[in-house]
Amino acid sequence: MDYQFDFVLVLRSLPVLLRGLLVTVELWVPSIFIGLCAGFLLSLARLSKSPWLRMPSLFYIELFRDTPVLIQLIWFFYAFPIIIGVQLSPFAAALLGLALNTSAYSAEIFRGGIQSIAQGQWEGARALGMRRSKILQRIILPQVFKRMLPAFTNRAIEVAKMSSLASVLSVHELMYQGRLLSSTYYRPLEILTTVAFIYFVLIYPGTWLSARLERRLAAKA
């Protein structure tokens, strides 16, 4: 193979890739935060005895879980503005799609964690006169946190990788910049390898810290 590697080009292009990385983080972190908050509320609606809360939340969750993320992002950019009468920016459409998709998956993680607690603990707390909100806050959620941690870690990793799909909306995140540089300099091997390495550096510390936290929680159990 007579291919001549040129990683000097990567060094010259690093500022562009780092700007893309910043946009990726700006998509990733709010998507996780909004998704977790909305997912918790959805899980409570999903567990509600009222069909007026349970059925719409179930429909919402299945809608986002059973359709491709790419279609969701494109729909929010091209179709949703027709409904609301306001054109969203590519970044706003991508953030909305990622956050809502994350909320659907997070809702199921919360639901599974809450339902894993023995019913007797709920009944005992009610016998003491505790309200549902206090039972969740003081008894249920502290116990299920370590059970949900691996699932939430996986979800955060998936959202970080899914943020690359925002490039199809011309959001100038890391993958978009990598594709742009590859097509400009005709050096996809060096540039896309660097993009993959940057994703690894971005994601791996979170998985490492999560594993450490899991072991610490297991030791305290």
Image (cartoon, helix red, strand yellow):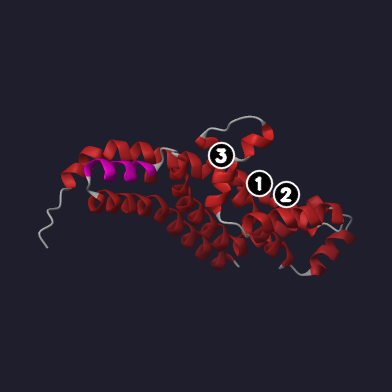
Q: Position of residue 150 (x, y in %)?
A: 55, 63
Residue 98 visible in the shown view: no
Q: Residue at x 57, y 33 (%)?
A: 88
Q: Which residue does the numbered mark 1 point to in the structure image?
A: 37
Q: Which of the two residues, 87 or 161, is positioned nearer the viewer here?
A: 87
The kind of residue tagged 2 is Leu
In this rendering, would 184 be left or right of 172? left
Residue at 53%, 32% in the rendered image:
89
What secondary structure is marked by label 2?
A: helix
Q: Earlier in the sequence, mark 2 or mark 3?
A: 2
Q: Residues within 10 Å of mark 1 (few under 14, many from 20)?
A: some
User: Closer to the camera: disc 1 or disc 3?
Assistant: 3
- Is 180 magenta? The answer is yes
Residue at the spot of label 2: 41
Which residue is more in the foreground, 163 or 157?
A: 163
| Tags 2 and 1 touching, CB below 8 Å | yes
Which one is nearer the viewer's eye here, 178 or 78? 78
**Which contiguous range is marked in magenta?**
176-185
Query: For the residues marked 2 and 3, what is the alpha-carbon distance in whole angstroms?
Result: 25 Å
Taking 155 as reference, is 170 left or right? Answer: left
How far from the left and from the top, in percent, is residue 81? 62, 35
Where in the figure is residue 132, as x and y percent of width and height?
82, 53
